[in-house]
Image: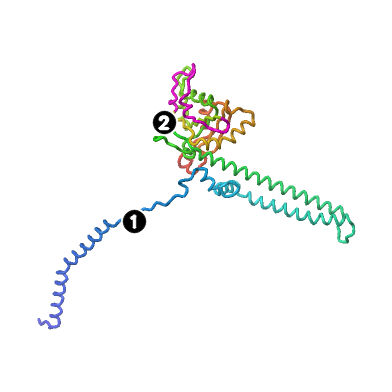
Amino acid sequence: MKISNRALTSSLLCLLSSSAVSAFQPSIRSSIATRDAFTSSSKLFVEPPPVRNKPNPDANLTPVEQEQLAQTFGGYTVKQRLREEVESPFRKVRLIFFASSAGSALTALYFSALSALKAYMGNFADAPPLEEALTSCAINIGGAIVCGLLAYRDYQAGQANLERIARGGKLAKLAVSSATAVDNEKMVVRTLSDYRRNARVLICAGGKEYIENVCKSLNADQLSDENNLPQLIDDVDLLVVPVLLTDENNVGDTKTTWYETIPGENDKNFDPSRSESVVAYPWNNAAWADYLKSEIETAKKQGFDVLQKGITITVKKNGKILRRATGFPRWNDLVGTMEVMDGSKFGMPGDDERYGA
């Protein structure tokens, strides 16, 4: 068999190229490995960018100053006004309609009054009959009064709703401190909004004698058997917040008064720490005094002595007020009917998943 020179030359070239590639493959692989190792090792020594804490302009402001900054116009925040619009979405439409109708009636009254004046003077050829002109005036006056009253009534309802929402915001911002803390370092301070979905709140506000009576009712065996009120209160997810009123405008040191309560003859086994798991004390007394001011004024108008008889405010798990009452809290009624008056499923997002449909 004869092999041409061209074929022989091609075969030799293929063999040489394959052997050259095989010879250089280890060096190529080692170069790639070295490059990857250098890259990965260099990543280990890359310094992270410095973390810059963004300054909080409201960090050094008091809650009152923050509230003032949040106010826009009319004493209410944008959030509160948006919530009012959600609760009554057509209020502005009604206000515009009734106000514009009242304006239209007043404009028509101006021209009908001119027509009545012309008819009365009798020197104008284009004047309508006096009776017809007076009828038009009466209709326009009636329309202006009715539309104006409807607009004013709707406006007043909106302002009352805004006031209620604002008071709800103040209530949610009220802070309490735990009763189990011995010193300020271990004290846990929470706002009432932190207890939403988890606990109900019973605010008991009154004078020194009233607070002492509340303390003895929770921490002493006043009947023949053992006092189990703290356990029953805990079972219905109720938090008791006693508030000492030194006068009608100021809140005093409730915690000190609570622990310095002197038991009476019928207060057996008195221990003010028995109810620590269900009691919290006011924090920032000025905020509590500001919130309770209107509640105290309302009770005074009804003829009740708040310092002596006291008032109670029951807050549901959704943050809304369930009941306002005067006098000593009726523990048995509260414990027995709380789940009926404010059930576990209370109409907030996620209730179906949490409690079942």
Q: How far apart are marks 2 and 1 (CA)?
A: 43 Å
Q: Please identify the quarter of the rendering in which residue 273 is found.
A: top left
Please tell me whether the stretch drawn in magenta is mainly helix, strand or loop.
Answer: loop
Type of amino acid under label 1: Pro
Comparing 338 with 99, the one in front is: 99
- Which residue carries the number 2 mark? 180
Q: Is residue 150 left or right of residue 201?
A: right
In the rendered structure, which segment of residues is drawn in magenta?
A: 247-275
Q: Residue at x 27, y 58 (%)?
A: 43
- 96 is higher (above) or lower (below) than 27: above
Residue lying farthest right?
Answer: 122
Q: For residue 303: magenta?
A: no
- Which residue carries the number 1 mark? 49
- 135 is higher (above) or lower (below) than 316: below
Q: For residue 260: magenta?
A: yes
Q: Position of residue 111 (x, y in %)?
A: 80, 57
Asked if labels 1 and 2 touch by Cβ distance under 8 angstroms, the answer is no
Mark with earlier residue (2, 1):
1
Comparing 245 with 312, the one in front is: 245
Q: Residue at x 58, y 30 (%)?
A: 325
> Dot 1, crowdedness within 10 Å: few (<14), some or many (≥20)?
few
Its colouring scheme is rainbow
Q: Which residue is drawn at 53% across and 26% down?
A: 208
Q: Please identify the quarter of the rendering in which residue 120 is found.
A: bottom right
Q: Position of residue 215 (x, y in %)?
A: 49, 25
Type of amino acid under label 2: Thr
Q: Position of residue 245 (x, y in %)?
A: 54, 30
- 103 is higher (above) or lower (below) than 17: above
Q: Does dot 2 land on a helix, a strand or a loop?
A: loop
Q: Position of residue 301 (x, y in %)?
A: 64, 32
User: How many marks are shown on the rendered structure?
Assistant: 2
